[in-house]
Image (cartoon, grey):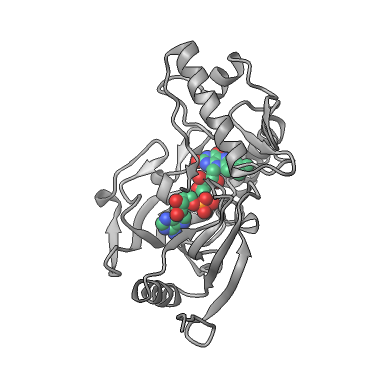
Amino acid sequence: MEPQISERNVRGKIERDFSLKKLNTWHIGGNAELVFWPVSCEDLLKGRSWCQKNKVKMLLLGRGSNILLPDEGIKGMVIVTSMLKNITWQEKRIMVEAGYPLSQLARQAADKGLEGLEFACGIPGTVGGAVMVNAGAHGAEISDLVRQVRVLDQKGEIMTLDREQIEFSYRTSSLQGKYWILECVLELVPGEPAVLKEKIRVFTEQRKNAQPLEYPNAGSVFRNPPHLSAGALIEQAGWKGKTVGGAQVSAKHANFIINTGKATALDVKTLINAITEDIEDKFGIQLKTEVQIFS
Ligand SMILES: Cc1cc2nc3c(=O)[nH]c(=O)nc-3n(C[C@H](O)[C@H](O)[C@H](O)COP(=O)(O)OP(=O)(O)OC[C@H]3O[C@@H](n4cnc5c(N)ncnc54)[C@H](O)[C@@H]3O)c2cc1C
């Protein structure tokens, strides 16, 4: 008989044959065999142990705002962190679980007069996803604020890493591929709520004007090469508005690929490959993706 996992063994929500489209901001992908939303880190651990024992493949997801999921779906279990939202505010420090929405945290910090997270007001991911890839904007990065990270290693052991034990650089960290992030401690500085809220208003306005937020997308598709803008190179090469199937290079921001309705992962990958080849031919620059491509 096939092994079963159910809400009787773990606390949280479990769905079978669930559309991946509902789990990522591009709204792309086939179905996942199993999806599990644990309500606590303990339940996440239980789900993970169950998968290991039953040799079920796993993918950890936050908001799915930096990933392209496959048209053919996922055989195995997708574990989504979005219900891991415990938070403790301690003067300048915030202890926050991995599934907490980053943009909401940024707004709450501003309301409380804590400065440092305003850059994150328009980043639609989770805290865990943001720390994993060192998310950043407007000249700031989450690594500026990280003091400690509680992680799960590949053997299933929980440990606490201090900031000094983690390497962060442009859109990456030494945590990638090694750990699952369970919780983080961020440290902010005191600020004036009205000033911080105004900063957030300006950043939000800038994004609305510059990014195609009216369509499903996954933010910047390519990393900026050193001292250059990937968007500017793609625009110069004439890609704005070009489509493959339902995927289109945004006419508003050339580093965004939007889903105009029925885009598939194959459409997006075909565009990404064509752009990469063209930029290499025209400028001799090898673009690398910022979005993760699940394969
Ligand atoms: C409109 C828009 C604007 C954006 N703007 C920015 C921006 O300004 N700056 C920026 O840096 N990014 C930006 N992004 C990209 C994205 O929001 C960030 O990279 C975000 O940090 C991803 O978080 P997530 O929870 O959605 O991660 P997901 O997309 O769910 O996951 C991404 C990767 O991280 C892993 N992961 C997720 N959670 C964890 C965890 N708890 N532990 C271990 N691994 C984990 C996943 O396995 C996957 O490999 C934007 C995206 C959109 C759609």
Question: Among all residues in the image, which is located at the extreme front?
Answer: 1
Residue at left 63%, top 16%?
Answer: 238
In-front residue for pair 83/115: 83
Q: Position of residue 27 (x, y in %)?
A: 66, 50
Q: Is residue 29 left or right of residue 178?
A: right
Question: Among all residues in the image, which is located at the extreme top?
Answer: 282
Q: Position of residue 115 (x, y in %)?
A: 51, 47
In-front residue for pair 172/3: 3
Residue at left 39%, top 45%?
Answer: 143
Q: Position of residue 114 (x, y in %)?
A: 52, 52
Q: Is residue 115 left or right of residue 170?
A: right
Does residue 197 appear in the picture of this structure? Answer: yes
Does residue 189 appear in the picture of this structure? Answer: no
| Relative height, residue 139 to residue 151 (above, below) | above
What count of labels does the image hold? 0
In-front residue for pair 125/286: 286
Q: Position of residue 98 (x, y in %)?
A: 47, 61
In-front residue for pair 249/232: 249
Residue at left 51%, top 68%?
Answer: 84
| Relative height, residue 104 to residue 79 (above, below) | above
